[in-house]
Image (cartoon, rainbow, N blue to C red):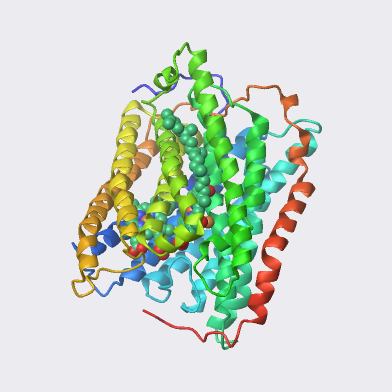
Amino acid sequence: MDPIQPQNASAKPFDRRDGGLVLAHILFAFGALLLGGIAGVLQGMVRGGVLTLPAGIGYYQLLTAHGVLMALIFTTFFIIGFLYSGLSHTTGGSLLSVVRRGAWAGFGLMAFGTVLGTILILLNKATVLYTFYAPMKASPYFYVALVFVVVGSWISGWGVFYQYRYWKKTHSGKLTPLFAFMAVITMLLWQVATLGVAAEVLLQLIPWSFGWVETVNVLLSRTLFWYFGHPLVYFWLLPTYICWYVIIPKLIGGRIYSDALARLSFLLLFLFSIPVGFHHQLMEPGISSEWKFLQVILTFMVVVPSLMTAFSLFATFELSGRAKGATGLFGWVKTLPWKDVRFFAPFMGMLVFIPAGAGGLINASNQMDAVVHNTLWVTGHFHLTVATSVALTFFGIAYWLLPVVTNRVLTPRINKLGLIQTILWCVGMFFMSGSMHTVGLLGSPRRTAYTTYDNHPDAVLWMPYHVAMAIGGMILFAAVLLMIYNLLALLKAPKGHTDYPIGEPMEPEAATPRILERWSLWLGITVVLILIAYTIPVMEMIQGGGPGSTGYKTW
Ligand code: HAS
Ligand code: HEM
Ligand code: CU
């Protein structure tokens, strides 16, 4: 079988030790995707009224497993594996051994935390959903499991910084590789964001669930959660953007539109994605409207770098198409490599990101959020963003990353199955997310097991959409299974060299202003923005916290 990419016999193979590290992360991530997918399809079937859960399994137990395994585990493991792969490739061909050892330690801690947390969810001792909102109280060991995951991810993040700094020191005066710069921002965002959830878990939830303190300040805990929870979604998005900015131009035979613009948009994402958590709490009492207003303004600021990203991508597509001889307004569309899954899957992710982002703008608008908050509309929104734009991009990456790190090749057969898998995902999501959006506008709540509300006319109206959701979910599950099959096939694909696809910018290195790498400046602005957005509201929450809640086990 021929590989789908021409062979380059003289190219250096990917460092074998780094390959093992990357592979472990990617396979762990896809294991989580499979388990999370099983929970997802069952949920869809329950809500559609086509299945009653056997053996005392609870709907919310499944929903917790799904949210945790998909949103927290699949993403984090994949991201760390992907970042290390690109870091190894762009900063000299191998990781420093101290970095590699640290990354394995991080992997071990995260894997242990994941296994412990999953067991507790399966034992029905932690049915608190992936946002683990107080006053719902899980087994204290569930929160301990989360600590393992977060601390593991910190250690992996420090490895990224260390490798980057080493490269910078040994290449003084040179512009750092774009991939490495972006990896640093992604992990920096993660460090700053996880401070909120670490404070929540260590200072509030662990002492409270072990019974060392009686009560918990609920509003404060949710605020700390969303201080983390919003940047969390950008932690998923930034590696997706790395693929769009750095990898895709290479795959289409074009060039990166602008290195400087790409760096600037990452910095803006870093600055503005943290002080905006209140847009998840717009409907929550206890936070005054002025502070919500400020954070909504900042939310709209963080849209700007996404629009810059859209602009750059269009520019790359159009310029590379015209360089290949395309004419007319949209002639370049035909020059894109539609039959290459490494391009097609992330491209579908980009396309979906247009309605996905538009939905986000609706959510962020206070009055409209009053209509959609806590309805399935929101669930529809994030199945387009994280579960399609991000997930499809990660799938697309896996189709070349696995061959790169195992020194194998993507065969035309797996490529074709990959195209089918992408289409299945899009069709399944069209039905599932489309009906979630629609039925959400009709008022159907999220996070609710099957019920007809005593045949209330509204619930009767919702039911056909819930059935469509279930059908979409089944198609998506088929796509998950096909993805797993494809990965297994890639692990047995013929040996051979696969290039790591890294794009080159159009302009010379000198065009990138060095101020973009002045970290003290950017970190300083971030701290100031966070202090402005959070200090007074958090003080009000601490002072006005009242007696707090002793907690509930609602399941
Ligand atoms: Fe969101 C809720 C607002 C983006 C994920 N969001 C959620 C939740 C998740 C989530 C998981 O303000 C639920 C949490 C929970 O369980 O409660 N979101 C936004 C806004 C944006 C946004 C303003 N969200 C994301 C991304 C996510 C994500 C990204 C994951 C990856 N979201 C909200 C709000 C809520 C919310 C409220 C709370 C709602 C509530 O009531 O609870 C923006 O960042 C979106 C900006 C994006 C764009 C699109 C740019 C387009 C691009 C593609 C270009 C395409 C090309 C191809 C070039 C403006 C970059 C075209 C080619 C052709 C040939 C046509
Ligand atoms: C929630 C289905 C893939 C993230 C849900 C819900 C359903 C569902 C039916 C619950 C709705 C509710 O009662 O509120 C599926 C199916 C999938 C899939 C069938 C594919 C096989 C994904 C992926 C991700 C994801 C890939 C993220 C990477 C989430 C999250 C929730 C959720 C974060 C919210 C959990 C909560 O509200 O606590 N999904 N989903 N899903 N899904 Fe998925
Ligand atoms: Cu948000």
* 550, above or below 512, in the image: below
Visible residue check, residue 306: yes
* 438, above or below 445, in the image: above
Q: Could you say which is closer to the camera, residue 26 or residue 213?
A: 213
Of all residues, the one furthest to the top in this rendering is: 325
Q: In the rendering, at what x and y percent does residue 80 appear?
A: 56, 48
Indicate left or right for 298 with 429 as reference. right
Q: In the rendering, at what x and y percent does residue 188 appear?
A: 66, 51
Q: In the rendering, at what x and y percent does residue 536 appear?
A: 70, 70
Q: Residue at x 44, y 63 (%)?
A: 370
* 1, above or below 272, in the image: above
Q: In the rendering, at what x and y percent does residue 465 appear?
A: 24, 56
Q: Could you say which is closer to the camera, residue 9 or residue 159?
A: 159
Q: Quadrant of residue 506?
A: top right
Q: Residue at x 36, y 66 (%)?
A: 447
Q: Quadrant of residue 413?
A: top left
Q: How many marks?
A: 0
Q: Which quarter of the image is occupied by the N terminus?
A: top left
Q: Which quarter of the image is occupied by the C terminus?
A: bottom left
Q: Could you say which is closer to the camera, residue 177 or residue 302?
A: 302
* 441, above or below 62, in the image: above
Visible residue check, residue 27: no
Q: Residue at x 67, y 50 (%)?
A: 271
Q: Residue at x 41, y 69 (%)?
A: 119
Of all residues, the one furthest to the front in this rendering is: 367
Indicate left or right for 248 with 420 as reference. right
